[in-house]
Image (cartoon, rainbow, N blue to C red):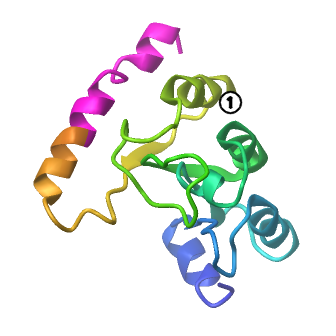
Amino acid sequence: MRLIEPEARSRGIRVGLEPEPEKWLSTPAQIIKLLEAELDPCVFGAVVDLAHADGVGDCILGYINKLAPYLMHIHVDDVQRGVFPHRHLIPGEGSLNYTEVLNLLDELGYDGWLSVELNRHIRGPAQAARLAYQFMQQYCGFWAESGT
């Protein structure tokens, strides 16, 4: 990571680190330790994948709160709570409460990207994208309606 830091800085690029269950950096605590001890927060930040909190036995709201100071991107997907190893689902097919998640992001003042991640939907990707789009449409006006 230190090798890419000067190049990223010179180009004005931020690099997101994503905790991934069962990998080298799997928890918010590990990401935070790395960001605070070794990396420049002007270059590096955190990516939250909504399915990963459950994959490490954490509550999604607590997971987001831990990474809030470093948050730069959200991967939107779903997960069936308590199923290990975690499996990325199309938003709306799992047990995540999107209203709670979006309310928290609003409270935190998050104004970064939300991107749907469909990394396990190689069969029927167009249908998966359509279903995700239809589900997420109900939240399109979320921030406009909440007054922020």
18 falls in the magenta region? no
- Would you identify the image quadrant in which residue 113 lies? top left
x%, y% of residue 57?
A: 72, 55
Q: Residue furthest front?
A: 83
- Horizontally, residue 56 falls left or right of residue 123, namely right
Image vertical order of residue 37 relative to residue 67, above or below: below
Towards the viewer: 46 or 88: 88
Q: Residue furthest bottom?
A: 3
x%, y% of residue 87?
A: 45, 60
Image vertical order of residue 113 relative to residue 37, above or below: above
What's the magenta region? 132-148
Callout count: 1
Image vertical order of residue 142 relative to residue 35, above or below: above
139 falls in the magenta region? yes
Towards the viewer: 76 or 121: 121
Towards the viewer: 4 or 99: 99
Towards the viewer: 136 or 35: 136
Mark 1 surroundings: few (<14), some (14-19) or many (≥20) residues within 10 A: few
Q: Which residue does the image show at 64% across and 49% down from the upper left?
A: 71
- In the structure shown, which secondary structural element does the residue marked by tag 1 occupy? helix
Q: Which residue does the image show at 57% across and 51% down from the upper left?
A: 72
Q: Which residue does the image show at 64% across and 76% down from the upper left?
A: 22
Name the quadrant of the N terminus.
bottom right
x%, y% of residue 106?
A: 59, 24
- Horizontally, residue 102 falls left or right of residue 31, namely left
The amino acid beneath tag 1 is: Leu
Task: Look at mark 1 in the image and give the residue it sits on.
Answer: 108
| Main SS category, magenta section | helix
x%, y% of residue 131?
A: 21, 40
- Horizontally, residue 21 falls left or right of residue 13, namely right
- Would you identify the image quadrant in which residue 141 lies? top left
